[in-house]
């Protein structure tokens, strides 16, 4: 926006106020009302929080701190801080999406998005610690040489992309889902204050890669590792909290770099002056000890009073079934909600039955409910058959006021390593919820009083797919 101002200066004489001279000032400023276009100290809103799970905080430039709420606006210099159960999604005004995973801190250092000329945008994020997934918006797509994600020891530039980064003060790992990234250590030729990808000692990783980029504080150059090998070396550990009896995961920094990835691919190009680790034979990962799969199968008497029960049309997986009963037992006093009888394209033999209390509508006094994973069963389906997986963690949140849901599961198997399933979408009036993409599907339902929930899920992975069932209790 260009503005012209003509200013007249006046002076007093014996005859009163009269013009003493005219000075014309031409002030031309092309201003875009986005990040960085305002004077220092003024807050500039650049995005909206779309999802919050668990405990997460928004720290402003003045070091004030408040709990993050869905729908809150974020500004330049804001920091998103998550605790061990926290997860935040941010949608920026240029349609970029950023996910901040548990135990993380992400700073929005600069976000100058020029809507009129996106190629003139300047964007800089700073991952202080933890894990984040970034999906480029119009600003990064059109101004790739002006986008930067800094970590404590390395700079990351993009080629229009979707990528996941895990960072500590001494280590950085990154995985590409789509597009390409360029990772380089900080140096005199690659300053944190600069924008865009660095060219010196850089590694470029593309979406076809079967590898991840890793850099350690003691190593001067980034290197490439096979995903399976890296998964094995950083598989999450877990412990049971003795004081509360609840299952909790211990923190394994860097593990979540594999989560939220879509497919595995191989590297096609590497920048000059790079060090590439030769291919290695993958070793089986060490699995977490926490598993929400019951040791023995439930019986009809165990679920007689439950509001939600999974019923199967056939014998299912036989001795591998853990949280299902036959259809007749599940249907006793309940009606079917979601499953293979509905047009959701799963091709499985399960139905989730719900106590309907003589009606089909949810209680009217429900707001936002967080659920704890109660029980689950999951399988890795491959040419070798159905192989039981561990279900190591899970979160589910339903906003009944906004009719939305969001969920996440952490699974593992020796042949697959760590697998993450996450989904979000709309909640229907009858309490059913769905999410379908090219690589995964899910369908679920919540009890009419909002106290229980369950869903079926399926996700494509390399050489097969992962599928399973879940049951949840209100926290």
Image (cartoon, rainbow, N blue to C red):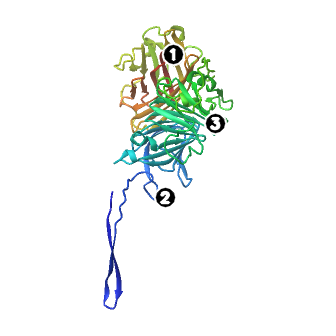
197 vs 235, left or right, is left
Which residue was labeled with disc 1? 379
**Residue denoted by label 3:** 220
Q: Name the outermost residue toward the front.
A: 272
Q: Measure how far apart labels 1 and 2 are at the Cα level.
A: 54 Å
Q: Quadrant of residue 459?
A: top left
Q: Secondary structure at mark 3?
A: loop
> Residue 305: where, in percent of width, then height?
49, 21
Position of the N terminus by quadrant: bottom left
- C-alpha distance separating marks 1 and 3: 41 Å
Q: Is disc 2 placed on a helix, strand or loop? A: loop
Q: Which residue was labeled with disc 2?
A: 40
Marks 1 & 2, CB-CB < 8 Å contact:
no
Viewer can see residue 131: no
Is the residue marked by circle 3 packed among few (<14), some (14-19), or many (20+) residues within 10 Å?
some
Residue 166 got which mark?
A: none
Within 10 Å of the Cα at label 1, are there few (<14), some (14-19), or many (20+) other Cα atoms?
A: many
In this picture, residue 36 sits left or right of residue 59: left
N-terminal of the pair, mark 1 or mark 3, is 3
Q: Find residue 236 and report its image quarter.
A: top right
| Mark nearer the viewer, 1 or 3 | 3
Residue 123 visible in the shown view: yes
Mark 2 or 3: the one toward you: 3
Q: Residue 162, position in %: x, y?
A: 46, 33
Upstream in sequence: badge 2 or badge 3: 2
Q: Is the Cβ of the residue at disc 2 closer than 8 Å to that at disc 3?
A: no
Figure check: 433 above or below 107: above
Looking at the picture, how far across and down is residue 291, in whole percent?
59, 22
């Amino acid at each position: 926006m260009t503005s012209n101002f003509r200013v007249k200066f006046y002076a007093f004489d014996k005859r009163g106020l009269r013009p003493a001279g005219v000075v014309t000032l031409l002030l031309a400023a092309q201003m875009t009302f986005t990040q960085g276009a305002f004077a220092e100290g003024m807050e500039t809103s650049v995005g909206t929080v779309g999802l919050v799970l668990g405990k997460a905080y928004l720290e402003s430039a003045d070091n004030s701190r408040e709990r993050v709420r869905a729908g809150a606006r974020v500004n330049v210099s804001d920091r998103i801080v998550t605790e061990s159960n926290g997860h935040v999604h941010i949608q920026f005004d240029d349609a970029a999406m950023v996910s901040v995973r548990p135990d993380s801190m992400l700073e929005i250092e600069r976000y100058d998005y020029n809507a009129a000329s996106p190629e003139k945008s300047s964007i800089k994020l700073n991952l202080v610690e933890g894990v984040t997934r970034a999906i480029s918006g119009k600003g990064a797509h059109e101004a790739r040489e002006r986008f930067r994600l800094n970590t404590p020891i390395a700079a990351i530039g993009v080629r229009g992309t979707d990528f996941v980064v895990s960072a500590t003060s001494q280590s950085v790992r990154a995985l590409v889902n789509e597009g390409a990234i360029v990772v380089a250590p900080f140096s005199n030729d690659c300053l944190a204050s600069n924008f865009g990808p660095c060219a010196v000692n850089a590694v470029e990783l593309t979406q076809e890669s079967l590898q991840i980029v890793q850099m350690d504080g003691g190593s001067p150059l980034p290197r490439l590792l096979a995903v399976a090998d890296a998964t094995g070396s950083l598989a999450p550990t877990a412990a049971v909290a003795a004081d509360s009896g609840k299952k909790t995961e211990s923190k394994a920094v860097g593990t979540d770099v594999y989560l939220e990835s879509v497919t595995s691919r191989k590297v096609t190009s590497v920048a000059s002056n790079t060090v590439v680790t030769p291919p290695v034979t993958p070793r089986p990962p060490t699995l977490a000890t926490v598993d929400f799969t019951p040791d023995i199968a439930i019986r009809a008497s165990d679920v007689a009073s439950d509001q939600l029960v999974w019923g199967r049309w056939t014998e299912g997986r036989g001795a591998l079934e853990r949280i299902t009963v036959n259809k007749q037992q599940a249907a006793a006093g309940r009606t079917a909600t979601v499953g293979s009888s509905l047009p959701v394209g799963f091709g499985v033999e399960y139905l989730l039955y719900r106590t309907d209390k003589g009606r089909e509508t949810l209680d009217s006094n429900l707001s936002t409910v967080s659920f704890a994973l109660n029980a689950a069963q999951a399988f890795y389906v491959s040419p070798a058959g159905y192989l039981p997986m561990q279900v190591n963690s899970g979160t589910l949140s339903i906003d009944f006021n906004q009719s939305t849901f969001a969920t996440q599961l952490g699974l593992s198997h020796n042949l697959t390593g760590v697998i993450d399933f996450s989904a979000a979408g709309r909640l229907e009036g009858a309490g059913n919820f769905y999410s379908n993409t090219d690589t995964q599907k899910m369908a679920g339902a919540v009890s009419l009083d909002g106290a229980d929930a369950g869903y079926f899920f399926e996700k494509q992975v390399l050489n097969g797919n992962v599928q399973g069932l879940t049951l949840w209790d209100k926290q």
